[in-house]
Image: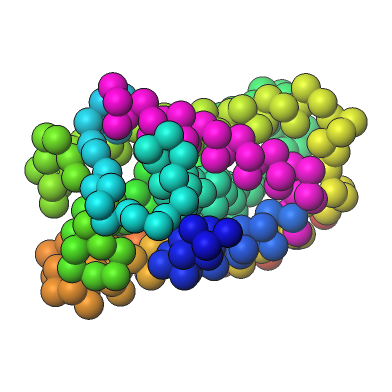
Amino acid sequence: MDILFTSVVKRPYVFAFLVAFVVLSVKRWGWKRSLLWLLSGYVIAWISEYSSINNGFPYGEYHYVYENLSNELMLGGVPVFDSLSYPFLIFAGYSTAEFIMRDTRHETKDKGPIAGSRVSGLVSRVLLGAALTMLLDVIIDPIATMGDKWFLGKIHFYAHPGWYFGVPLTNFGGWFLVPLAVILFNMRMWNHFPGFFCERDAAGEERLNVVYPLFYLAIALFNIVITFSVGEWKLGISSSVLLLAVAGFVMRAFRNAPARRTKVS
């Protein structure tokens, strides 16, 4: 219990975002889908991290600095708080992708085969969700490797640092594959057991409002503020450009939302 308390105290931002994820996902999907997403996201993330620290896949070879992780909850050499961040980061990426592409949720008969359009739209949302999660890591991971400059602490290092502020490109590849696996697994389960993982209600589009991409932007902004606060201006500017690009797509989707609803009705 003391170790769990220490982990919460040392990483309050992780647990704050986790609570926000629970609230938003239950509102969006209901508790069954949310619980599956949380559990499967954690398990897949833990496997990926355990594999990387032992085999170098999928993120590249990295190692935790265990002397700086004393009195924190660990599982198989992986900090519990680290794997816990995956479910809410992937949720933020996927729900933002849904918001940006929500026009593909509504197809009319004059546009051709509805089934084909829906499948194409689904694949696009899945890929975009994984890509947006990866972009979050592009913002997060470089400043996380500089944890000795802020309250995170020096908790890990790459055996072969990369050119992007010390982060290897393999890490970003892993951060595309793992979210993709989490999203596809959950969708497979939802579709395979529709009676159990039923929709919360029929008005999913109405529940998919701007608060979901705002959750994504809040996570990114938190890390950008940390980046500038420790004087990493080049990284801060690079991360800000990425955030503004995503925000631009979100704003475009938000402005077009009334027209979409009118067209559907």
x and y percent of residue 233 in the render? 14, 70
Q: Residue at x 59, y 28 (%)?
A: 184
Residue 172 in view, yes or no:
yes
Q: In which quarter of the image is residue 20?
A: bottom right
Left or right of residue 191: residue 169: left
Nearest the viewer among 229 and 47 is 47
Nearest the viewer among 195 and 42 is 42
Left or right of residue 211: residue 237: left
Name above or below for residue 68 compared with residue 169.
below
Left or right of residue 220: residue 189: right
Q: In which quarter of the image is the N terminus?
A: bottom right
Give the magenta range: 27-55
Q: Quadrant of residue 134?
A: top left
Q: Which residue lies furthest to the bottom in this view?
A: 229
Name above or below for residue 205 compared with residue 247.
above
Left or right of residue 176: residue 115: right
Q: Which residue is drawn at 35% across and 32% down?
A: 174
Q: Quadrant of residue 59?
A: top left
